[in-house]
Image (cartoon, helix red, strand yellow):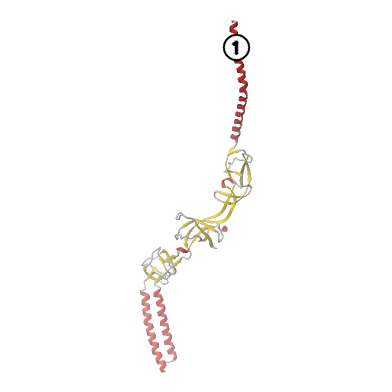
Amino acid sequence: MAEGERDIGRSWFWPNLARGKLTLRRALPLFIILAMALAAIGIWLFTQGRAIAVATAKAERGPAVELVYATGFVEPQQPVTVSARLTAPVRRVLVEEGDRVTAGQPLILLDDAEQRGLLAQAQADARNAMLARQRISKLYQEGWATKAAYDQAVAADSAASAAVDALKARVDQTVVRAGIAGMVLKRDVYPGDLAVPGRQLLQLGDPALARVTATVDERDISRVRTGQEVVMSSDGIDKVVHGRVTEITPTGDPGQRAFRVRIGLTDSVTLPLGLTLEVNIVTGRHDNALLVPASAIVDEHLFVIEDRRAYERKVKAGIAGPDKVEILSGIRDGETVALSPPATLEDGDRVRQ
């Protein structure tokens, strides 16, 4: 190779080689940083892949309410059964269900022909007794009759008059009247029926004086007390109705295994008689309770999440609702708990939220 050619090659080769060494020296720190980042990502993926995924929530303060659930219906406070006081065919019914009535208003007319016939006979007997008394009285005053005859005539006259009064009352009883002011709630009689004493013909009640009768399971009745607050609702109304327990029947129903509880309404509301209600009796209330979701507790234990690890805690529960449970001891306000913890979760396990 000529001398000129060697100079040209040397002048091209060495400067480029020098520039290549300089590029590698500058790229080395970048390679090291990239390798460390990839290692960190690998470690994170490895550890997170082993962590157990859980949903979480925080323990927080709020009201805890203990309820007894029951079903009930609206009924009058003083339902009145209307029946006849004598046996007679029904001639006419003057009211229908839903009619308003006043005290003493005629409701049903019974056939009174027999009673009026007996009254007419009694009135005739009374007239004869009165005339006989007048004759004996005159004879007694003139000395032609004895004191005993006079006394007997007076007694017969009084008895005849009493019989007339009794039959007048019987005739009046053929008109069945309302004993209270209210509404006709039920009608069980029609013209031609035979009314007998003791048979229900009508039922009356005052919707303005209504109450709720609830059926409470015997397992819950021990927690119910008079005076407790009651919250009620129904598909038939668009409002919540409030009341208080006024009475607990002393005897339960063995067939239904339940007790009847009377509830007085505290709201100024008129409810349809017979309306069915969902009844919630408030048997306990804590306004500043520590609450956690009910799904966090399993067999009186839950898991508290701290520094991405789950730590098992034994807790003491208080009032339990369908969604949340009051915690009396075992955790503090604001701590994070695992919801529906997996069966494989153990104390100290790494978790990810």
Q: How many marks?
A: 1
What is the x, y in percent for residue 45? 59, 32
What residue sits 41% from the left and 82% below the top? 161
Amino acid type at circle 1 is: Ser
Residue 255 seen in render: no
What residue sits 46% from the left and 63% below the top? 208
What is the x, y in percent for residue 77? 48, 64
Mark 1 Cα-neighbour bin, 10 Å: few <14, some 14–19, many ≥20: few
- Decide which of 343, 236 is in the foreground and name it: 236
- Decide which of 85, 312 is in the foreground and name it: 312
* Residue that mark 1 sits on: 11
Seen in the picture, residue 270 relative to 339 is either above or below; the reply is below
Query: In the rendered image, which quarter is residue 164 located in?
Result: bottom left
Question: Relative to 331, is 233 on the left or the right?
Answer: left
What is the x, y in percent for residue 218? 55, 57
What is the x, y in percent for residue 136? 40, 90
Secondary structure of the residue carrying tag 1 is helix
Query: In the rendered image, which quarter is residue 285 located in?
Result: bottom right
Question: Relative to 175, is 47 on the left or the right?
Answer: right
- Decide which of 16, 126 is in the foreground and name it: 16
Seen in the picture, residue 33 relative to 10 is either above or below; the reply is below
Residue 139 seen in render: yes
Q: Which quarter shows the N terminus?
A: top right
Q: Please identify the residue farthest to the top as the structure is shown.
A: 2
Q: Which quarter shows the C terminus?
A: top right
